[in-house]
Image (cartoon, helix red, strand yellow):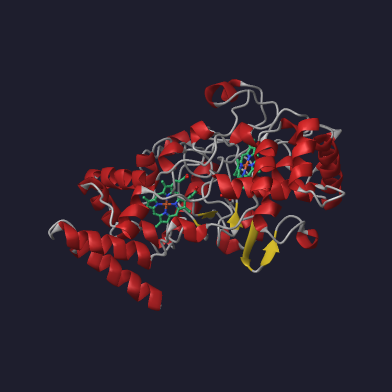
Amino acid sequence: MKFAIKYIAAAICVSICTSSFASPLREAVLRNAAIENGFVKPEQTHATVNLELVKVGKLLFESKLLSLNEDTACASCHLDRFGSADGLPNAIGVGGVGHGERRLRSEGAIIPRNTLALWGVGGLEFDRFFWDGKVDKSDQQISSQFGDSKPSDDPLVVAVHLPPAELDEMLRDSKENLIFETESVGSATALYKILTARILSDSRLAQEVAVAYPEVREVTFLHLAKAIAAFIRENFKLQPTKFSKFVFENGALTEAELKGGLVFYGKGRCSGCHKGPYFSDMKFHAIPFPQIGFGKNGYGVDYGRFNTTLNAEEIYKFRTPVLYNVAKTAPYSHSGAVTSLKDAIIYHFDPLKDYQSERDDSRSRAEFYKRLSVWSNETFKPELLNEDDIENLITFLGTLEFEAQMSVLELE
Ligand code: HEC
Ligand code: HEC
């Protein structure tokens, strides 16, 4: 309640204090709004990492040996040129070749979700992973598919265990491989043993692993996962941005950036959900973006968070995405249905834009009505934004950009 009053007061101030006042006041309003909403200096989100682990973690991230059929690496879907995502609506896993358009045309298996970028992932207080939070440490305890046999207390290390054991993502859906599905923790363990033995039989990787773990006599998959986690933490950690320099170092913004920032914290109500150090409240919300592809639940349906918790109140909800480098990670939303940043913003307050009821069958229409009704219960919805507001918001989002520490090898 206290928060709500504070928020409303801040929103009123941000609306009143826009354009008609002199710039220094508007700048102060924006700085305060950012800090009130949990924005911190990038260094404050950095976890300590072991740089030897980072080095070997990078090699593992780029290695196809981590997929049973040796055709897919983490770097097949998390690429520099697409801002650590893959530029595709739905990710393409095993059997996929190349990237972008080429990967789309290849025979690769389709994953019914949009690839998440890795900015800030694993930083301090980043505790819910994946669109549906299927790895979650927000309650101190880790919940994940591993149940009580979780491999680590570090949620990022647990998250890193999943892709190699995920059918279609890095594991081919064949009769022989079916026994390795994550559904059974025992079979995933068997898979991890095979992958670890393989990595250790590669002379270069084995040597690097030995350097990173001089004391360890029996290297297991957990050691490899910790190294990959260290790499993600280091490589994608938050860096100073134009916005952080503005807020904490008295840096300047252009007029459009300033206006966009005031919309973000003001009538856009973006900061109701996109807040905190990562511009995500790490909570789950329903935004009725169009849904494309087969969907996690089949026939173009994705129940989102409900798939993880089976809580009826969480149906159609997805974890608020991080907004760093967002201009580089199109297409948008959990199903990648939205191609432009402009539309990604508009659907938050005008979900019927472009909706053609005749395009859908009655089943999909019924599905869409349900999503609209869940959305209507969301506390924060943007006011109607005009063209200028949207353009300024996009310009503002551009102030949240930075580069990765190292460049990831581009694989064929
Ligand atoms: C086939 C493409 C593909 C491959 C290969 C892949 N990923 Fe991903 N990654 C995705 C997709 C798609 C998502 C979002 C999935 C979801 O949330 O349902 C994702 C999400 C993630 C996340 C969660 C990010 C967040 O914000 O919560 C992490 C961490 C991650 N991947 C790491 C890895 C690592 C490490 C590897 C290699 C071991 C890997 N990925 C391999 C496509 C891929
Ligand atoms: C009610 C909470 C909420 C509010 C308010 C909100 N967002 Fe979002 N936003 C989300 C969620 C949740 C998603 C992902 C939903 C999905 O994919 O189904 C999202 C997605 C996005 C995306 C796409 C990101 C990506 O990587 O796919 C952008 C861009 C975005 N929001 C910007 C904004 C802006 C700008 C505003 C203010 C005008 C705003 N949001 C207001 C919760 C919110």
The image shows residue 233, relative to residue 99, as above or below, that is below
- Give ligand 1's quarter of the image: top right
The residue drawn where x is 53% and y is 38% is 84
Q: Is residue 320 left or right of residue 295?
A: left
Residue sitting nearer the eye, 155 or 124: 124
Is residue 87 visible from the viewing direction of this image?
no
The quarter of the picture where residue 144 lies is bottom right
The image shows residue 100 at horizontal and vertical percentages of 53, 26
The quarter of the picture where residue 12 lies is bottom left
Residue sitting nearer the eye, 208 or 247: 208
Q: Is residue 78 left or right of residue 21?
A: right
The image shows residue 329, relative to residue 262, as above or below, that is above
The image shows residue 129 at horizontal and vertical percentages of 60, 53
Is residue 104 visible from the viewing direction of this image?
yes
Residue sitting nearer the eye, 39 or 331: 39
Pick out the residue farthest to the bottom.
2
The image shows residue 128 at horizontal and vertical percentages of 59, 58
